[in-house]
Structures are given as structure tokens and as C-alpha cells.
Image (tube, rainbow, N blue to C red):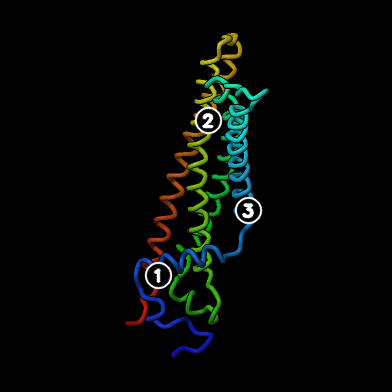
């Protein structure tokens, strides 16, 4: 039997995929948040709030009633209401969040590459996490943030395209100067989104490589 300060026996933590994933998820949640991670999560949360508010506004507008008769907004108005938040600025904010995530992943991946993980864990006091363990937790968290950013980029890109479709479906035609202005917003947002999707792929590849090296270097549990 192990003492209260020792890690659980092998029977309590079987060395299978589910247990490894559970331990990694728990350590990721428990790891302290650095300022870069907080700012990145805050930027992505802002985008989520804007998107949610836009959809809620469109739903409320399309179901409004006056004197018992529904005001049936056109498809164009619903699209414009739900996508008016999208554009170059929200896409740029997501790109900034990805830059912070990339910075974190690159730094913590170097920690795993520069340390002998087995010796590092041996030096850690019982019940305490080593620097390598912290690195794994932060890499896992930032990989989740990169996934969130990728979904946000997809939603923002679809919203920008939807806004252009909504303007095209409006009954009153837009002047050419407004089409040029909105077209510039569309092209600019899609260019930034393309860079963002490339960054998401690079970040996730870096995370996978770092975690694979860590798994290879980690000491095997006693049989």
C-alpha cells in the first residue's frame, strides 16, 4: 500500500488510454493560467459573445409582433442582423489570440525538448508537479485554445460571407461604392482567416510533436 503522499498504485491508475487521457485532462485543468492564456481565452470569448448576440438579435427581430401580426423580416434582414458583427476586426482578434497560443506552445515545447523528463520528475518532491508536467498541462490547454480559435475562424468566415449574401438579397440595391467597401471587408477577413487556419495547423502539429516526445521520454510505470 502506498502512503498518503505517494502516487496511487497501478491498480488505481491502470496504464490504458482512458486513464492517461483522464490524468492529462485533470492536470490541464489544475495547471495555473499564464497571462498569455488568459488574454487569448478572453479574446475568443469576446468573439463568441458577439456571434451569440448577433444570432439572438436576428431571432428576436424575426419573431417580433405588432398588433398580433408577425413582422416577417426578409432572409436578407435576418442574415444582416445575425452577421453584422463579423469583419476584419473580429478575425484579427482571433489571429492575435492564436499568436499568443503559438507563443505559449513554442515556449513550453522547448521546455520538454531541453529537459531530461525522467530526471526532472525524479527531482520533483512527492505530490508536486515537475516543470515537464507543467509543460504538458500548458501544451494541452493551448491545443484546446487553438481548436476553439479554429472554430471561431470558421464561424467568422461564414458570417462575413453571409453578410455579403444578405446585402445581395436586399430589395433596394446597394451603391457600387458600398459594394466595394463591403467586398474589401470580405476579402480582408478571408485573408486573415486563411493565415489563422494555417497557424492552427502549425500549432496543433507542434503540440502533437512535443507530446509525442514527452510520452517517449516519460518513464514507464512499474509492472
Residue 19 numbered tag: 1
Tag 2 and tag 1, C-beta contact below 8 Å: no
| Placement of 191 over or under 120, stated as above or below | above
Q: CA distance from mark 1 to mark 3?
A: 28 Å
> In percent of the image, x 48 and y 58: which residue is there?
140
Q: Quadrant of the N terminus?
A: bottom left
Tell me the SS state at disc 1: helix
Pick the residue in front: 72 or 128.
72
| Placement of 197 over or under 76, stated as above or below | below
Pick the residue in front: 4 or 214.
4
Instruction: Report x, y in % for residue 210.
Output: 43, 59
* Foreground tag (1 vs 3): 1
Q: Is residue 121 left or right of residue 222?
A: right
Neighbour tally class for label 3: few under 14, some 14-19, many 20 plus, Cα within 10 Å: few
Tag 3 residue: 38
Instruction: Report x, y in % for residue 170.
Output: 55, 14
Residue 159 numbered tag: 2
Instruction: Report x, y in % for residue 188.
Output: 54, 26
Residue 59 numbered tag: none
Residue furthest right in the image: 67
Neighbour tally class for label 1: few under 14, some 14-19, many 20 plus, Cα within 10 Å: few
Q: How many marks?
A: 3
- Location of residue 179 (image quadrant): top right
User: Can the viewer see residue 197 in this picture?
Assistant: yes
Amino acid at each position: 500500500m502506498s502512503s498518503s503522499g505517494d502516487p496511487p498504485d497501478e491498480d488505481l491508475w491502470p496504464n490504458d488510454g482512458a486513464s492517461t487521457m483522464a490524468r492529462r485532462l485533470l492536470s490541464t485543468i489544475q495547471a495555473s493560467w499564464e497571462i498569455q492564456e488568459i488574454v487569448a481565452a478572453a479574446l475568443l470569448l469576446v468573439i463568441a459573445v458577439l456571434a451569440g448576440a448577433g444570432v439572438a438579435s436576428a431571432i428576436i427581430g424575426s419573431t417580433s409582433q405588432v398588433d398580433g401580426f408577425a413582422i416577417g423580416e426578409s432572409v436578407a434582414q435576418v442574415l444582416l442582423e445575425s452577421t453584422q458583427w463579423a469583419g476584419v476586426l473580429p478575425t484579427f482578434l482571433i489571429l492575435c489570440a492564436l499568436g499568443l497560443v503559438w507563443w505559449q506552445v513554442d515556449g513550453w515545447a522547448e521546455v520538454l525538448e531541453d529537459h531530461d523528463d525522467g530526471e526532472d520528475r525524479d527531482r520533483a518532491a512527492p505530490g508536486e508537479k515537475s516543470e515537464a508536467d507543467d509543460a504538458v498541462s500548458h501544451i494541452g490547454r493551448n491545443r484546446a485554445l487553438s481548436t476553439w480559435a479554429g472554430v471561431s475562424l470558421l464561424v467568422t468566415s461564414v458570417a462575413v460571407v453571409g453578410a455579403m449574401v444578405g446585402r445581395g438579397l436586399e430589395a433596394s440595391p446597394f451603391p457600387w461604392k458600398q459594394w466595394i467597401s463591403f467586398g474589401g471587408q470580405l476579402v480582408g477577413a478571408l485573408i486573415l482567416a486563411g493565415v489563422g487556419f494555417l497557424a492552427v495547423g502549425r500549432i496543433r502539429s507542434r503540440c502533437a510533436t512535443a507530446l509525442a516526445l514527452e510520452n517517449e521520454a516519460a518513464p514507464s510505470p512499474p509492472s
